[in-house]
Amino acid sequence: MPTMFCVHPLVEKPDGSPVFIAFRSSTKKSVQYDDVPEYKDRLSLSENYTLSISNARISDEKRFVCMLVTEDNVFEAPTIVKVFKQPSKPEIVSKAPFLETEQLKKLGDCISKDSYPEGNITWYRSGRVLQPLEGVVDIVFKKEMDPVTQLYTMTSSLEYKTTKADIQMPFTCSVTYYGPSGQKTVYSEQAVFDIYYPTEQVTLQVLPPRSAIKEGDNITLKCLGNGNPPPEEFFFYLPGQPEGIRSSNTYTLTDVRRNATGDYRCSLTDKKSMIASTTITVHYLDLSLNPSGEVTKQIGDALPVSCTISASRNATVVWMKTEESPYINGKYYSKIIISPEENVTLTCTAENQLERTVNSLNVSAISIPEHDEADVISDENREKVNDQAKLIVGIVVGLLLAALVAGVVYWLYMKKSKTASKHVNKDLGNLEENKKLEENNHKTEA
């Protein structure tokens, strides 16, 4: 190496003309920097002739030449300086609030800023690259350079025709750029979109869920469509009613009775052919006693009692008498015969898997004295009773005899009266005849 030399770095302007930017001699320790405004206070030429540029700029990307000047010759060694700027992490913006099946709709924009050189943006569905496809995938890419910083902003817009298969599927995008060590890729966060699709099926539920419905229950019919968003209004059809009742997705029935048993349906308001149905059976358990209420019976007399059941499911009858263990006696209709010795309460209980019904009969047992119980009367009372009976019999007999005598006397009297009447009439006739004879005698004498 020559004993005396100098290094004179220079750069080329866009038009190709050289500009010296620094100078260092082998005999002098000091460094001389040329007056180049864009490199002011950013250059450093070390003792080993290494040129460093701080606070690199895009404008620093150019051809640099190291010029070695000796006493005998001039040598040049050019190099191309490349400047790289890693872009920002890509972000999906302007995201669609929802996507609709069978419609090509903008999904969103993928944007990455401050890149140099510019990068490329790629879209992914569930980790797989989305390639442009007419009517299904439409990608528009654009880049913009900041005139001041000369950095690039890349934007990629995606229009996409979704299907139900895209439900819960993640969409991402990435930016690929070049750096000093080669190509690199940065990925965005995942974005999941709400997929709208029409209702294809309607279902009808009965709430709350239960194994059986019995009289007095409150139930709610809930109609559901499998579309997204789900339908908010439905028509509910009750048994025997051809016209639907417009309601939200629920319809409540309170205190149901057995006549509520039947088929229930619901449909969409805008598509009545899409319908769902369910059958509701309201179970019941009725019980009646015959006789019922309260009964009074002679001690020891037989009392038939029947228990009749009307039920929608098999039921068992259980009879119970006061302070006695229960016993089972048939189903649906049961009859027992009791002979009460004291007051009792007779209870008939009907029970099945759904409910339990109880009815009771109060039986009062009483004692009615009979004629053969006269032996309990004391001797003194018995004598008084006998005397009174004899007196009564005597009076009755006396009255009968008196009536008989009076009858005989009356008969004799009537008989005698008839005979006397005949004699009187006869005597009166003779008297009249004598009178006529006397009158005739007087007429003759004259």
Image (cartoon, rainbow, N blue to C red):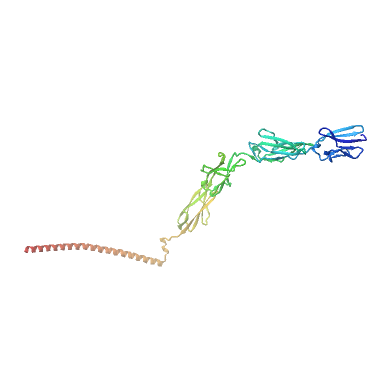
**Which residue sits at x=31%, y=64%?**
399
**Which residue sits at x=51%, y=46%?**
259
Residue most extreme to the right: 3
Image spot of residue 64 (x, y percent): 84, 35
Tell me how many marks there are: 0
Residue most extreme to the top: 73
Instruction: State whether residue 230 is above or below residue 73.
Output: below
* Image quarter of the N terminus: top right
Residue most extreme to the left: 446
* Image quarter of the C terminus: bottom left
For the residue pair 201 and 135, the one nearer the viewer reads as: 135
Q: Is residue 162 left or right of residue 206?
A: right
Residue most extreme to the bottom: 380
Image spot of residue 360 (x, y percent): 50, 54
For the residue pair 68 and 222, the one nearer the viewer reads as: 68
Image spot of residue 395 (x, y percent): 33, 65
- When asked about the image quadrant of residue 387, the answer is bottom left
Q: Is residue 360 left or right of residue 5?
A: left
For the residue pair 29 and 100, the one nearer the viewer reads as: 29
Image spot of residue 93 (x, y percent): 70, 40
**Which residue sits at x=29%, y=63%?**
403
Q: Is residue 219 left or right of residue 36?
A: left
